[in-house]
Amino acid sequence: MRQRRPLPQPDEGGEVDPAEVRRRAKQQEQEMAPYVVGAVLFIALGVAGLVTWWHPNISFHRAPVSKLDMEKEEVLAHLRNHTILHVGGVHYSGLTLLSELLVQHPQLAGMRHQEGADKRKTHWVSDVGNDGVFLQTVIPNWGTDHKHFALWKSVSKMAKRILPASVEEHFPWMKLRSGIGRFALNPEHHLDDSTWLIRSSAQVHLFSEWALFWDLSKKVLLEKSPSNVVLSPFLHRLWSLDLNTQSPGRFIFQQRHPLAVAIATRRRLGPLVDDLSMKDLMENWLAAEERRAKDMQSYFEYYGFAKDVFRIVQFEDLIRDPEKVVQRAVWDV
């Protein structure tokens, strides 16, 4: 900051020129004015910032909440009074169409941005195609969001070109088995009723995250994710923890001809699956369906649940007569 200029001193006659004094004082005031204005603005902005930060109706500076604040007893009460309908199947089997038709029923609640919730979350559901697996942090998505897998995809693509198939089979890490069109090929991409994730804390956390997007006033809460095709025993067992009643988990799986699935996957994803042949994509379909069939036999049929909680819908039947298929599915639920 500049030093203040001294006021004019008296001349030899002992007199001070009043005009010079006023001129010097005015000059000093003009020099100090920007600093005074700056200080006032700084204080005003600080006060406004504090008021904005603590105001209950202003939340742009806070991250959107990712789940409802629910206690265990509250979650258990909802599980006793609701049915949780999981829709699954291989990607591009028409799951979105089936789900959208199902939620037309007045007692079915799909995953939507709920009225009164943070508007910054509005795009979350639509950005992920209403897939519940991307709206939670408990269940792995096995690369189906196609994040952080570009390097492994490049390695897999190069290995497939320069190495014989026998070498690739002996070194599974060379073949990318995460993401759409390939996740079911990895035997580790499966959660059954014995997984360590089946615990009370996971039950509360998962329901609290999904409840953020459900209308809890409706009887049936629908969650759609293609990866449910390899998760059904886990989900059914998880929802039954600490309940004195049967698990509220129900499942509808939609099948579509594997060739149609492979063609749709290649057409929709393009470069993301350019290292996969039609044969690879159909092998992924086969692996997923085999996994689902084994789960049905080893868990649902073994414990006597299959008749009540497990339904399979054909995509071709849905296209041919959607009203009949949806009515039957809703009736079963």
Image (spheres, rainbow, N blue to C red):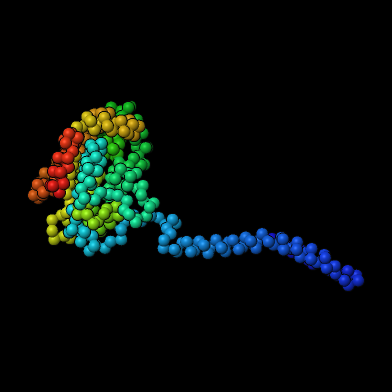
- Is residue 292 in view? no
- Given residues 84 and 265, the one toward you in this image is 84
Measuring from the top left, give residue 332's x and y in whole percent.
13, 47
Locate residue 10 relative to residue 283 in the image: left or right.
Answer: right
> Residue 314's quadrant in the figure?
top left
Measuring from the top left, give residue 248's x and y in whole percent.
17, 54
> Residue 226's quadrant in the figure?
top left
* Residue name at image x 49 percent, y 63 percent: 50
* Residue name at image x 32 percent, y 27 percent: 161
Locate residue 331 relative to residue 134 in the image: left or right.
Answer: left
- Given residues 218 and 144, the one toward you in this image is 218
> Residue 41's quadrant in the figure?
bottom right
Q: Quadrant of the N terminus?
A: bottom right
- Given residues 167 and 118, the one toward you in this image is 118
- Is residue 263 in view? yes
* Residue name at image x 37 percent, y 37 percent: 151
Measuring from the top left, give residue 31's x and y in whole percent.
71, 60
Measuring from the top left, give residue 293's x and y in whole percent.
14, 40
* Residue name at image x 48 percent, y 64 percent: 51
Judged from this view, the residue extending furthest toward the right is: 13
Does 261 sit above or below residue 40? above
Does 155 sit above or below residue 193? above
